[in-house]
Image (cartoon, rainbow, N blue to C red):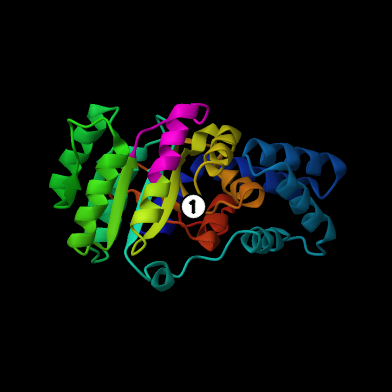
Amino acid sequence: MAFVGKVFKAFKRTRETISDAFDSVRKQKISIESLDELEESLILADIGLGTVEKVVDVIKKSKQDNFILEVENFLISILPENQNDKSYFSKPMVILMVGVNGTGKTTSCAKLAKYYKSQGKKVLMIAADTYRAAAVDQLKVWSNRLDVELIYNVSSNQPSAVLFDGLTAAKSQDSDIIIVDTAGRLHTSKNLMSELEKMYRLAKKNFSSFNINSLITLDASLGQNSLIQAKDFARIVQLDGAILTKMDGTAKGGIVFPLYNESNISVKFIGAGEDLDDLFRFNRNEYVQSILGTNDIS
């Protein structure tokens, strides 16, 4: 199902919060009271205080009753343009998947493998989470289902060694996309974060023929806590983007804005369900229209 269908539905709770707030302003007319109510609703949706204040300014300056279109244009303008896949794949790409426990990181690895394989890419996965046997078992099941090779070593407790072996195999096999599942770790754990930094340096130093990327999985329902996680991980490795997971169960879908405006981390994918097909490339136009309800397809 296309982004505008499945993700539109996934943003139902966020959209209800935001669109109801704008409807209230329209019905009450623009006033101090109605704008205060709007601010509160937008903050609850985790759009971020700075963005909320600018939205209110857009409404105040609007000369049209239908100010929602001006708000839509503004919100689209402050998000990064959708990425050009051709430049993104200038050479084989390694995706280090990072994040805290419980954000859907391992599941997102499998979803990414499905996404890129469906585009005709030769995909290889590396199970570099040497702490959680269940993660390797999960990836074994999914790699078999997807017919994607998985590199792992259940006898090793050295994730960097598993990563090195996996990238060596990927290079010899001319893989296009290499997806690396790293151990879920609390951003406050110095030892585990140092280990992640070591893995990132190893890949950068020894495999220059690959485009090394790091994506962080963030639980959208955590709102501002996800923003804190992203900032802490960004101090250890260069984050090239985020995957927002569990978007279908939250009213805090506005976190996309502070994530980019405060941390310069752009959302690359939206996770909106448990199936392997429930991963969608982020599109700023369709995202903004989905949370505002201006592309109502119901």
* Picture quarter with the N terminus: bottom left
Q: Residue at x 66, y 47 (%)?
A: 262
User: Which x, y percent locates residue 110?
Assistant: 27, 46
Q: Is residue 179 left or right of residue 223?
A: left
Q: Is residue 59 visible?
A: yes
Q: Which residue bears the numbered disc 1?
A: 241
Q: Is residue 25 left or right of residue 213?
A: right
Q: Residue at x 28, y 45 (%)?
A: 163
Q: Residue at x 59, y 46 (%)?
A: 259
Q: Amino acid at mark 1?
A: Gly
Q: Extreme right residue here? A: 32
Residue 135 drawn in magenta: no
Q: Quadrant of residue 140?
A: top left
Within-10-Å neighbours for mark 1: few <14, some 14–19, many 20+: many
Q: Is residue 245 visible?
A: no
Secondary structure of the residue carrying numbered label 1: strand
Q: Quadrant of residue 285?
A: bottom right
Q: Residue at x 29, y 54 (%)?
A: 178
Magenta stretch?
A: 182-199
Residue 189 drawn in magenta: yes
User: Which x, y percent locates residue 89?
Assistant: 37, 68
User: Which x, y percent locates residue 277?
Assistant: 29, 50
